[in-house]
Amino acid sequence: QVQLVESGGGLAQAGGSLRLSCAASGGTFSTYVMAWFRQAPEKEREFVAYIGRSGGSTNVADSVKGRFTISRDNAKNTVYLQMNSLKPEDTAVYYCAGGPRNWGDLRKGSTYDYWGQGTQVTVSL
């Protein structure tokens, strides 16, 4: 059974930075496409970023482009989300997701088989 555990969330001021981590266990991490999604209160879950199996391909949402970077370390079974220039509208629960499919719409949550429990990110003015 694959388990994903996020960490690194917390409170940050606008303009600040946070780095989220997602540690995977119970599967073959290097064969999974990994992604980050987020859900703000009373809003639908939205795509943030995904990264291919080797880390050679990435895609980020327009809302975070230039501010957020996704990366992975297959030796550590971990995917990261570096978040810079944070804004109050980045406040949300951030979820790590993963799965073996590297085809179809990788910006859709339904593509992914495994999900973490989420980590809260709160950005204040």
Image: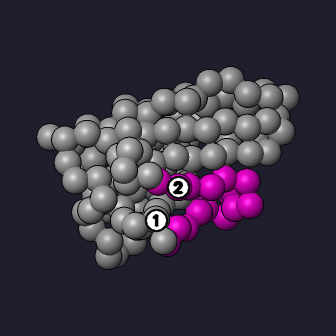
The N terminus: image quadrant: top left
- Return the residue nearer the eye: 19 or 120: 19
Magenta stretch in the rendered image:
57-72
Residue at the left extreme? 1
The amino acid pointed to by label 2 is Ser
- The residue under the point 79% across, 45% down is 85
- Kindly identify which residue carries mark 1: 55
The amino acid pointed to by label 1 is Gly
Q: Residues within 10 Å of mark 1 (few under 14, many from 20)?
A: some
- The residue under the point 32% across, 76% down is 103
User: From this viewpoint, is residue 17 visible?
Assistant: yes
Circles 2, 1 touching at the beta carbon (< 8 Å): yes
- Return the residue nearer the eye: 60 or 28: 28
First of labels 2, 1 by sequence position: 1
- The residue under the point 47% across, 54% down is 72
The C terminus: image quadrant: top right
User: From this viewpoint, is residue 41 visible?
Assistant: no
Residue 50: percent from left, percent from top: 48, 61
Residue 88: percent from left, percent from top: 76, 36
Residue 116: percent from left, percent from top: 35, 37
| Residue 61 part of the magenta segment | yes
Residue 111: percent from left, percent from top: 31, 62
Q: How many numbered dots are placed on residues in this image?
A: 2
- Return the residue nearer the eye: 76 or 70: 76
Give the number of the disc on residue 78.
none
- Kindly identify which residue carries mark 2: 71
Whether residue 105 sits left or right of residue 45 in the image: it is left
Alpha carbon distance from label 2 to label 1? 7 Å
Q: Is mark 2 on a helix, strand or loop?
A: strand
- The residue under the point 74% across, 61% down is 66
